[in-house]
Amino acid sequence: MKVVILSCSPRKGGNCDILTSAVVRLISGAEVYYSRDIECSPCDGCGYCERAGVCKHGDGAVALYEKLLAADAILVIAPVYFYSFDAHTKAIIDRAQYLWHKVKDRRIPLYLIACGGQSGENNFTYIQKVLVSCGLAIGGDYKAGLFFPSTDAVGDILRGGGVERACIAVQDWGLSNN
Ligand SMILES: Cc1cc2nc3c(=O)[nH]c(=O)nc-3n(C[C@H](O)[C@H](O)[C@H](O)COP(=O)(O)O)c2cc1C
């Protein structure tokens, strides 16, 4: 099973990076992409893709979507920014619009691990909905998430067994083959 991990934090070495480094070791053959490294022009709603079936921006976002379309499962690891994804990752998600009318014949599983500085699970309501919507575009079915509230400063995820819980979730979700 080909698992693609999309790791979304703009902050290098932060909580999502720590989680990514831990869980990738459990998934042999996993491909990891960091959204901050992906060159991406924002979607401007030009409608070119509706006519041509491809996006006019031939940048890193298209290359990423080629990888995601070849995956059997996708794990997204993200910080919550204003209840959603950070702006750069959201720009990448918007670019999935070119796939909206194309991919209908597959439903691969999508999973989310998210960190947020605020306490409580409400922080994670909307980021899940954004991922559900992205799944509709790319042929993915949002299955489950694991959420870490009160996780703000770099390394907060190391308190309270967060990394261990993420590793258990990856195993429970059937993504681990190590
Ligand atoms: C611009 C910005 C917006 C944020 N918005 C939220 C938010 O809406 N809810 C929340 O719980 N945390 C919010 N946070 C806190 C981050 O989610 C938190 O620091 C997280 O641990 C960052 O993950 P990282 O260390 O992987 O970058 C925000 C942080 C930034 C910088």
Image: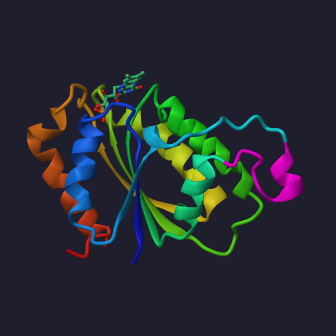
In this rendering, the answer to whether 12 lies above or below 162 is: above
Q: Nearer the viewer, residue 94 or 160?
A: 94
Quadrant where the image shows the N terminus? bottom left
Q: Quadrant of residue 177?
A: bottom left
Q: Nearer the viewer, residue 151 or 22?
A: 22
Q: Does 173 lie within the magenta span? A: no
Quadrant where the image shows the C terminus? bottom left
In this rendering, the answer to whether 43 lies above or below 30 is: above
Number of marks in picture = 0
Residue occupying image coordinates x 52% and y 33%: 88
Q: Is residue 19 left or right of residue 46?
A: left
Q: Nearer the viewer, residue 155 or 109?
A: 155
In this rendering, the answer to whether 53 lies above or below 104 is: above
Q: What's drawn in magenta, residue-wise? A: 47-58
Question: Splitting the image into four quadrants, where does ligand 1 fall?
Answer: top left
Q: Position of residue 148 (x, y in %)?
A: 26, 40
Q: Position of residue 115 (x, y in %)?
A: 31, 37
Q: Is residue 133 left or right of residue 79?
A: right
Q: Quadrant of residue 99?
A: bottom right
